[in-house]
Image (spheres, helix red, strand yellow):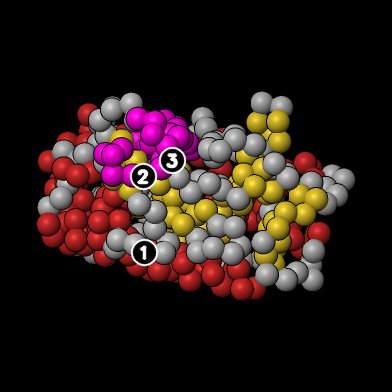
């Protein structure tokens, strides 16, 4: 695994905009970078794929253990959320996708930092944008990227033949692009699709409805479950009959409080880091993380001996520094569709913590 400096395509902005990637630059700074790429060998890719499959299996087992033991309080879930997640799990509600954030230097076993299992973004960049880049720049190389094809096939499993509604906060370019991309893959799978803003979802007294007063039978929402459960209409969810993507049981998996439970259930696993709800249980440097948060929000690195802030709903995880290439801290985002690892996307930053402004850099392997 290495970072190579390369020459960007002369017209790269026009090329990525032509395929629908409009937020390649944020506040005047590049978000998409192609003056560099990450290069892997086949062994490193095989290692990432195997670790992702292993970790996903551990996570699914952990969800089952949590539900069967009723350990919702350990995740900060109230009764309504717990009942909804439990019913969803026992009903075997299918999931669509997720992204694991891994620390990997190409030599040591990949370590799970967190599982973005409910509303992961950077999907379009990983699936489409970097694939077109590869075809232009290194057509003789390969890329760990079967995301697009896997999504189309997965929609044929989870779609159920009904109309699929897609909801997001469309005033966010990243959320809108991600949702529209997923809608497109769903349409390519042969399903009837309809987009609407999350605020346009209505309630008829019997069912959730769209702007044409049509019942919303199946809904993909790029809107976190913890936000959804705080909305007034959350009380209608159990009786609505709507099937959700991601399903309610993802509330357990997308919650960083699952990290201490994973360590409890599978102590010493080579792909896991020690994690706890108390600082004293983690020797040395640690990272404090809120149960819920996106793109590095609320995360801080604590030096050995440094105490946490003591706020509720936070966990502590052993510090696994990201590898540094050319002064850039590199994070692997490993994508799962259904239960299968299907590709990776690389993010990098000059800081220790990966945030929404951290750059996306394409990859290849030979």
Depth order, front residue of 360/258: 258
Label 3: element kind: loop
Question: Camera-side residue: 132 or 30?
Answer: 30
* Whole-percent x, y for residue 296 in the image: 47, 36
Classed neighbour count for the residue bearing mark 3: other residues with Cα under 10 Å, few (<14), some (14–19), many (≥20): some
* Main SS category, magenta section: loop
Q: Which element type, helix, strand or loop, lies under badge 1?
A: loop
Determine if the magenta segment contains residue 284. Answer: yes
Seen from the viewer's position, the closer of residues 111 and 146 is 111
Residue 85 lies in the magenta stretch: no
Quick one: 273 or 337, which is closer to the camera?
273
Q: Position of residue 158 (x, y in %)?
A: 36, 64
Is disc 2 placed on a helix, strand or loop? loop
Query: Which residue does the image show at 12% across and 52% down from the upper left?
Result: 70
Distance from disc 3 to disc 1, alpha carbons, whole Å, reads 19 Å
The outermost residue toward the front is 305
Q: Which mark is residue 269?
A: 1
Q: Residue at x 23, y 33 (%)?
A: 233
Indicate the quadrant where residue 167 lies: top left
Q: Earlier in the sequence, mark 3 or mark 1?
A: 1
Please identify the quarter of the rendering in which residue 207 is found: top left
Q: CA distance from mark 2 to mark 1?
A: 17 Å
Q: Quadrant of the C terminus?
A: bottom right
The CA span between labels 2 and 3 is: 7 Å
Q: Is residue 347 left or right of residue 268?
A: right
The image's mark for residue 285 is 3
Q: Which residue is mark 2?
A: 283
Residue 299's tag is none
Residue 218 picture location, percent across and down: 32, 53
Q: Residues in magenta?
A: 278-307
């Amino acid at each position: 695994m290495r970072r190579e400096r390369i020459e960007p395509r002369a017209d790269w902005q026009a090329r990525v905009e032509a395929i629908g990637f409009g937020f390649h630059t944020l506040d005047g700074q590049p978000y998409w970078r192609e003056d560099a790429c990450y290069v892997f060998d086949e062994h490193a890719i095989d290692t990432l794929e195997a670790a992702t499959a292993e970790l996903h299996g551990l996570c699914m087992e952990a969800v089952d253990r949590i539900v069967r033991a009723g350990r919702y309080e350990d995740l900060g879930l109230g009764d309504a959320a717990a009942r909804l997640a439990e019913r969803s799990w026992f009903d075997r509600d299918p999931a669509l996708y997720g992204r694991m954030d891994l620390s990997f230097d190409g030599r040591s076993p990949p370590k799970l930092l967190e599982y973005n299992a409910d509303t992961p973004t950077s999907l379009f960049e990983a699936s489409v944008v970097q694939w077109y880049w590869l075809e232009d720049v290194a057509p003789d190389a390969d890329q760990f990227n079967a995301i697009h094809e896997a999504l189309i096939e997965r929609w044929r499993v989870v779609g159920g033949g009904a109309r699929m509604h897609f909801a997001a906060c469309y005033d966010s370019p990243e959320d809108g692009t991600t949702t529209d991309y997923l809608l497109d893959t769903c349409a390519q799978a042969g399903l009837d699709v309809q987009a609407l803003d999350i605020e346009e979802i209505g309630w008829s007294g019997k069912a959730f409805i769209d702007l044409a007063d049509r019942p919303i039978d199946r809904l993909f929402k790029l809107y976190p479950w913890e936000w959804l459960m705080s909305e007034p209409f959350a009380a209608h969810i159990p009786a609505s009959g709507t099937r959700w993507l991601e399903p309610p049981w993802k509330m357990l998996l997308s919650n960083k409080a699952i990290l201490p439970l994973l360590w409890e259930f599978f102590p010493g696993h080579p792909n896991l880091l020690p994690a706890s709800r108390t600082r004293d249980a983690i020797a040395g440097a640690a990272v404090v993380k809120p149960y819920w948060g996106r793109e590095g929000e609320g995360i801080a690195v604590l030096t050995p001996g440094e105490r946490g802030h003591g706020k509720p709903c936070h966990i502590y995880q052993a510090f696994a520094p990201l590898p540094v290439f050319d002064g850039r801290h590199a994070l692997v985002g490993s994508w799962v569709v259904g239960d299968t690892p299907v590709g990776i996307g690389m993010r990098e930053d000059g800081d220790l913590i990966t945030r929404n402004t951290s750059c996306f850099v394409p990859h290849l392997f030979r």
